[in-house]
Image (tube, rainbow, N blue to C red):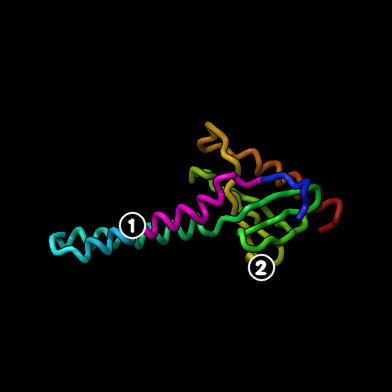
Amino acid sequence: MSPAAIELSSRYTFFTKIVFPILWIGGFGAGSMALWASNNAPSQIKWTFLAVWAVGSLSIRWSSVRLKRVRVDGKTFYVSNYRKEIALPLGSVERVSENRWINIHPVTLYLRRPTDFGSKIVFMPKMKMFLLWRSHPVVAEIKHMVALAQTEGGA
């Protein structure tokens, strides 16, 4: 772990990755179970709540739980899932993309080789106001760092 590493991830990553899914999935699941246990709730409402809970849980699983904490120093990305941290040389990134249509602008690092976290790393960058559909500035910064590392290291 490098003490000089710069945090690329939002400070809300832990909340978005761990706290929010537990609260939403658990809370909505408990509410659905309470509806099913009730004799007063119409069947249509029970099925609707169950469907919303299932779709919402899958959506949260896809968008939130996969997020990683990412830091970088001059040569290395430090990627954590809050239980384990791995170090990736900048040159191990093949390409970088982001999803501008989702409000957290998730950034994806596509890796040349699979790691303990798979072949791509998704993180939530620090929030910037008024980005709307524009690219998050961290994407250009990462692309620049990776390009430099690849030309210097021949990756």
Give neighbour class at mark 2: few <14, some 14-19, many 20+ (Cα, 10 Å).
Answer: few
Residue type for callout 1 = Phe
Report if residue 23 lies within the magenta region. Answer: yes
Quadrant containing the N terminus is bottom right
- Quarter of image, res 139: top right
Q: Is residue 111 left or right of residue 52?
A: right
Labels 2 and 1: the sequence-earlier one: 1
In magenta, the rendered stretch is 8-27
Spot occupied by residue 85 in the image (x, y as percentages of width and height): 68, 60
Q: Residue placed at 61% from the left, 58% from the top?
A: 82
SS of the residue at dot 2?
Answer: loop
Q: Is residue 45 left or right of residue 115?
A: left
Q: Residue placed at 45% from the left, 52% from the top?
A: 20
Residue type for callout 2 = Asp
Q: Disc 2 to disc 1, how far (Cα)?
A: 32 Å
Residue under circle 1?
Answer: 28
Spot occupied by residue 33 in the image (x, y as percentages of width and height): 27, 64
Spot occupied by residue 50 in the image (x, y as percentages of width and height): 28, 62
Quadrant containing the C terminus is bottom right
Q: In front of the other: label 2 or label 1?
A: 1
Toward the viewer: 26 or 124?
26
Q: Residue placed at 20% from the left, 58% from the top?
A: 45
Residue under circle 2?
Answer: 116
